[in-house]
Image (cartoon, rainbow, N blue to C red):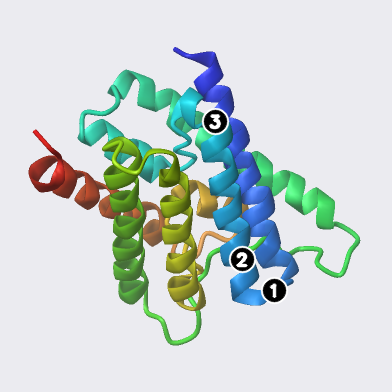
């Protein structure tokens, strides 16, 4: 087990929740601000830790890497554990940071917005996560985009948030949803935020390995 990789995944997921969910909780910049906050965290940490852990910072991405054969299952368990712990710790620190302010109690939870059914939200999370993981495979994993892969991945994430944010909160990441849910005690529709991104990641993995990957 590579301790450096696990630490990189922990701190990256921690930062994603603290800054990404924090931007939603504070509300500065609205939807655009949230998209940029998430995207820039991913961009920065891909360049900072990509050579160490691959900067998954998302259990759905790790699952896709296992299914595609890019990662061993024995390594993935550690990634999943530190991602979920890092996301929860990020929500704990965010809750502490906002305590006593006008934003107290807000943790940037990913929730279904009025009029969006759980089935609609489930489909949206599948599709948007598919787009994100597809971008990862065809830039970073394939090696075709070189140093620009981080920009492509971050831009895809920001685009997905701009579309899905007003509908589901655009989680695309079980750790992004689970951390704030645990700290707030709000587990409404949690299943779709865990299962949807996982299925989306799997679909991207199947497409890449079955059709798009150069043999």
Question: Which residue is nearer to you in this view: 160 or 103?
Answer: 160
Provide the residue designation for mark 3: 49
Q: Residues within 10 Å of mark 1 (few under 14, many from 20)?
A: few
In the rendered structure, are the residues bearing label 1 and label 2 in contact, judged by CB atoms less than 8 Å apart? yes
Q: Tell me which numbered mark, 2 or 3, is placed earlier along the sequence.
A: 2
- Quarter of the figure that contains the N terminus: top left
Measuring from the top left, give residue 24's x and y in whole percent.
66, 66
Identify the secondary structure beneath mark 1: loop
In the rendered structure, are the residues bearing label 2 and label 3 in contact, judged by CB atoms less than 8 Å apart? no
Above or below 86: residue 114: below
Cα distance in 3D space between marks 1 and 2: 7 Å
Measuring from the top left, give residue 105's x and y in whole percent.
76, 63
Measuring from the top left, give residue 87's x and y in whole percent.
59, 43
Q: Which mark is residue 29?
A: 1
Name which residue lies at 50% across and 79% down. Answer: 113
Name which residue lies at 32% across and 76% down. Answer: 120
Whether residue 85 is visible to the viewer of this picture, yes or no, is no
Q: Tell me which numbered mark, 1 or 3, is placed earlier along the sequence.
A: 1
- Quarter of the figure that contains the C terminus: top left
Provide the residue designation for mark 2: 34
Q: Say left or right for 192 vs 202.
A: right
Name which residue lies at 68% across and 49% down. Answer: 18
Identify the secondary structure beneath mark 2: helix
**Total numbered labels placed on residues in the image:** 3
Above or below 128: residue 121: below
Name which residue lies at 30% across and 26% down. Answer: 71
């Amino acid at each position: 087990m590579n301790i450096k990789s696990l630490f990189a995944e922990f701190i990256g997921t921690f930062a994603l929740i603290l800054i990404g969910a924090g931007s939603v909780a504070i509300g500065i910049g609205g939807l655009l601000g949230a998209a940029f906050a998430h995207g820039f965290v991913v961009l920065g940490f891909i360049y900072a830790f990509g050579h160490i852990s691959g900067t998954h910072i998302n259990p759905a991405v790790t699952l896709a890497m296992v299914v595609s054969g890019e990662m061993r299952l024995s390594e993935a368990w550690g990634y999943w554990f530190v991602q979920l712990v890092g996301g929860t710790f990020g929500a704990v620190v965010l809750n502490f940071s906002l305590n006593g302010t006008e934003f107290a109690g807000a943790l940037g939870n990913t929730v279904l917005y009025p009029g969006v059914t759980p089935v609609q939200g489930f489909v949206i999370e599948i599709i948007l996560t598919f787009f994100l993981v597809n971008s990862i495979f065809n830039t970073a994993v394939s090696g075709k985009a070189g140093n620009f892969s981080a920009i492509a991945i971050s831009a895809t994430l920001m685009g997905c948030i701009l579309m899905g944010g007003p509908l589901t909160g655009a989680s695309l990441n079980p750790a992004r949803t689970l951390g704030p849910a645990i700290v707030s005690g709000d587990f409404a529709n949690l299943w779709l935020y865990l299962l949807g991104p996982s299925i989306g990641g799997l679909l991207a993995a199947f497409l890449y390995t079955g059709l798009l990957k150069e043999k």
